[in-house]
Amino acid sequence: MVDHLESGYYPSIRLRRMRADSFSRALMRESTLRVDDLIQPLFVREGNNKSEPILSMPGIERLSIDRIVRKCRDLQNLGIRSVVLFPVIPQEIKSDDAGQAWNPNGLVQRTISAIKDKVPEIGVMTDVALDPYTANGQDGLVDDSGYVVNDLTVEALIRQSLSHARAGADVVAPSDMMDGRICGIRKALEDEGFFNLRILSYAAKYASSLYGPFRDAVSSASNLGESTKDSYQMDPANSEEALRETALDIKEGADMVMVKPGTPYLDVVWRIREAFGMPTFAYQVSGEYAMLKAASQNGWIDEQSVVLETLLGFKRAGCHGVLTYFAEQAAQWLNP
């Protein structure tokens, strides 16, 4: 007998008993990761039968609409139930007013229609933000001083959301962090009869340094230059503010809320899920993906085990689902 454990509990209580075999570990498993927890982001570009690798995101490509449709069919066959679309807009049609964002014949709008025509069962989410369309790379419209103005941007986001709804989107996901945009979008959707179109709000989107590969992917990095998004995205030091932001978005009509980035902000995910009990999501962003890919390609980690462990961590923190560039790979690993 080990003297320092003579407390009256040991050996009656041995927590390792339930860890001794795989069947008993499974019986007491608190969190599970399933394929239908995963949402695959997709980058769409113009052209026909085109694919273009994204060097900073190995394994991820910019795809033309026809290839996006095929990709959606493949994802659905793996059990993935939803995708989110991000456009790669040619530089020559970017503008100060981001007018292409609500063009009914725009790239995203045509992609939505094509997916819903050929793969109608898959859920199509759309990014609602102006940075792919603005000449300056900001998520909103700017004044003469370069400041992103709130209310004019919200008006543009409403137009963009309505154009996505008319094209057949299932979910619009405002990622801009403007004040009042959920309320404006919700009212506009209701007024046009889109009563069941869901809003996934990027309720707590941080001014993170982990977005670099994404900005390369959508060709907005050069437009943004040395500018920052600190005046509208959240300070990484804050979590109380995330609760206030989320509470407002829920009150304004959000159906789901999201934290972005993911892994460094799991404490925020947990606080939001505990405080509101809402469908809660996180975005494992491009920088997180790139770091894991680089480490695995250098032989420093086992990619499959580390990625699945990371995704399980999102579920343990309270996520109902995860937007991740690993969705397709993870589905292949999880499927028997």
Image (spheres, helix red, strand yellow):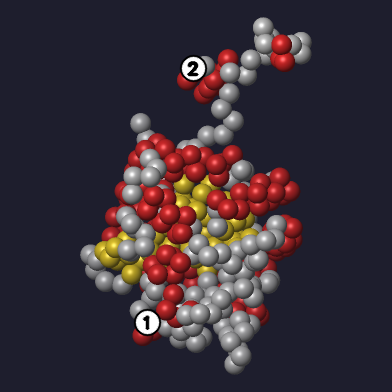
The amino acid on which the numbered mark 2 sits, given as a three-letter code, is: Asp
Direction from residue 191 to residue 334 in the image, left or right: left
Residues 144 and 65: in front is 144
- What residue do we see at 33% from left, 49% from top? 298
Image position of 165 with respect to 332: above or below: below
Is residue 235 at all visible to an observer of this figure? yes
- The residue that appears at 42% across and 65% down in the rendered structure is 213
Residue that sits furthest to the top in the current view: 1
Residue 218 in percent (x, y) is at 40, 70
Q: Are marks 1 and 2 in contact (CB under 8 Å)?
A: no
Left or right, 103 with reference to 72? right
Quadrant in which the C terminus is drawn? top left
Residue 91 got which mark? 1
Q: CA distance from mark 1 to mark 2?
A: 57 Å
Q: Residue at x 46, y 52 (%)?
A: 324
Tag 1: amino acid:
Gln
Image position, residue 170 (x, y; %)? 50, 58
Residue 109, percent from left and from top? 41, 70
Q: How many marks?
A: 2
> Which residue lies most toward the left here?
49
Q: Which element carries disc 1, helix, strand or loop?
A: helix
Query: On the rendered structure, is 138 left or right of 56?
Result: right
| Residue 134: percent from left, percent from top | 48, 81
- Quarter of the image with the N terminus is top right
Residue 2 vs residue 184, the one in the foreground: 2
Residue linked to disc 2: 21
Compared with residue 311, is residue 265 higher up or lower down, i.e. above or below?
A: below
Q: Earlier in the sequence, mark 1 or mark 2?
A: 2
